[in-house]
Image (cartoon, rainbow, N blue to C red):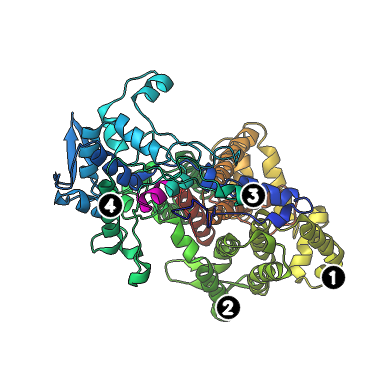
Amino acid sequence: MDIFTGEVIAMHSSPSFDPNLFVFGISQDNWQIIRNDPMKPLLNKTLQGRYSPGSTLKPIVALSALENGIINTKFTVRCTGKTELYDQTYHCWKKEGHGYVSLRNAMKMSCDTYFYEIARKLGVDKLSETAKKFGLGKKVFDNLFEIEKDGLIPNTQWKKNALGKGWLLGETIITGIGQGYIQTTPIQLCLMTAQIANGGYKIYPKILIDDKDKIKPSDYYTPLYKDSRNIKIIQDAMFGSTNEVMGTSYRSRIDNPKYQFAGKTGTAQVKKITERERELDFRLTNNNFTFFQKFRNFDYILLICILLLGFISLTTMYSTDGGKILFHTKSHFTKLMVFTIMMLFISFINIKFWFSIGYLSYIVVVSLLVWTYFFGITSSGSKRWMDLYFINLQPSELMKIFIILCLAKYFHRMKLENVNSVYTILTSLIIILLPMGLVIVQPDLGTSVLIAVSGIAVLWFAGINHKYFIYTMLGFVISLPFVIAFLKPYQKLRVLTFLNPDKDPLGAGYQIIQSKIAVGSGGIFGKGFLKGTQSYLEFLPEKHTDFIFTLFSEEFGFVGSVVLLVIYIIIIYRIIAIGANSRSYFAKLFCYGFGAAIFVFITINMSMVLGLLPIVGSPLPIMSYGGSSMLATMIGFGIVMSARVHSQQLIA
């Protein structure tokens, strides 16, 4: 803004949106992306955003105190880091305090204690009068923009009329540092600063300029001050804040004398952060909470459901061992404990860290898949595992999670108009197809399909046009005969067994036939814990891995199965809810993708054991025995919980 004419030279609201999307009518998908963006790109924040001004109000507080004769330049306050009034403690951003400070140094170092004291002596009504005089609390452009919002400059009468309550001294004190009820728009703060910069004269901001603007209002050059020397004192203090060592905006200075400027930093404290972070202009959204603050931000419903699912899985594993604490039970318990602690640890790590390693984690797991191809452990004709001594790691299970992390990062900074570009789609397909190919050659067709599902879920939520999914599905159906021709013999046998399991009831069809018998024999309430005949009489092979649901359903029946499904549904709902409430697009995409992947994993596993799908290697999350699967799932839950703990974290 030109400080003499009021002409707006530049005005920007971020984030914005591409207006070209509206030229020929915006698509429903694009509209929903813009409309549901938590950063509200449709909101003109310069005119409509109402925020606590924070320490940017301090020049007005000091000016008001000078103008009303409350203080002078020699007025000094001793700052010890806090001040106590009527059993209330008010902290300065500098915990150890600033010592004795005068007006200039208090402005320069933005000492809260100093401004608490002068606000107390000044009173909110006099402060309100000066703030309004300099343009705060009212529309800057009158009625030029219908969307422009008023601010709020509170006083004793306002609170009585609006809230029916009397004004409190503590409210005056926090108003002195630009917090509490006070709200201003960015354009109002711009006008306030411009009028201080021009020597304290009233100006009329304008966007459009024509000949009529040459006719100046009668009060165009009206001074807003009582004593011009007070304005100069404020200007000098703001200059020190920017250009002198220990000034809070010193790092923003320009060393060239031709371009030196004055200013005042300020960060509104809308969530609890450290005093230093608030004043030194650290972004509030860093959310560097203490351990206990982070713990309070946990999604306890999700955590309880995960722990409950872990308990159910442990009791079911105990049942697979015949009611004895044998190898599977011990191993499952150990992994469950270790990975649950790991999940909690991951949740305390800022979501920005997981964003930063999105590509790296993908590259590492791809490298592990390559290593497995050449040096992996061969078992049952497949080379899927790495011997890490304490665990046989299956990297393909990790890829189910880290492909979501990678794609969420890839689309995080993607411009809306580029989401459906050929380059974006091809890059996304390469990210998905590369690990798929490495897993298929192990061979492990089932896991490769689940990796693809995880990646495709992110593409769906990222806004890839739905027609591409339809084309892909049609292409898959058309190519199915050719795909079957390239399947391994055992894979073809699984497909044939799915179509007609009774063709070989004692061979390839045995597993699925026994599985359906076990589920059906459970009835409404089940046979009871440790009383599943199909399991105990060894009719059901592999009951501790992919067919764990069969054993559970036989012992706890339809009711138990519904309870288990409800737990899974709550988990998926909480994951999606955490994504919806996250401010960063990366966290949203990860949560949505992970929630969709968990849903598909559960659906495929249960459909498989019920004979609705061919048998593929798809463990039931947390329930099935298997360290790699549980490790991957718990990492996913940990990142989701990290998104919840740091839900207000913005990622540039």
User: Which residue, given by chain and number where applicable, does mark 1 sit on?
Assistant: 482
Q: Which three-letter amino acid code belongs to the residue tagged 2?
A: Val
| Residue 1 % position (x, y) | 48, 54
Please name whichever residue, 550 or 532, is drawn nearer the observer in this view of the structure: 550
Which numbered dot is residue 370? 2
3D distance between C-alphas at marks 3 and 4:
45 Å
User: Which residue, given by chain and number where applicable, does mark 4 sit on?
Assistant: 232
Is 195 colored magenta in this rendering? yes
Name the residue at 80% across, 59% down. Answer: 473
Please name whichever residue, 71 or 252, is drawn nearer the observer in this view of the structure: 71
What is the span of residues highlighted in magenta in the rendered image?
192-199
3D distance between C-alphas at marks 4 and 2:
69 Å
3D distance between C-alphas at marks 2 and 3:
40 Å
Which numbered dot is residue 34? 3
Q: Which three-letter amino acid code belongs to the residue tagged 1?
A: Phe
Name the residue at 44% across, 54% down. Answer: 3
Dots 2 and 3: beta carbons under 8 Å?
A: no
Dots 4 and 1: beta carbons under 8 Å?
A: no
Q: Which three-letter amino acid code belongs to the residue tagged 3?
A: Ile
Dots 4 and 2: beta carbons under 8 Å?
A: no
Q: Is mark 3 on a helix, strand or loop?
A: helix
Q: Which of marks 3 and 4 is nearer the N terminus?
A: 3
Q: In which quarter of the image is residue 295?
A: top left
Which is closer to the viewer, label 4 or label 1? 4
Q: Residue furthest top?
A: 164
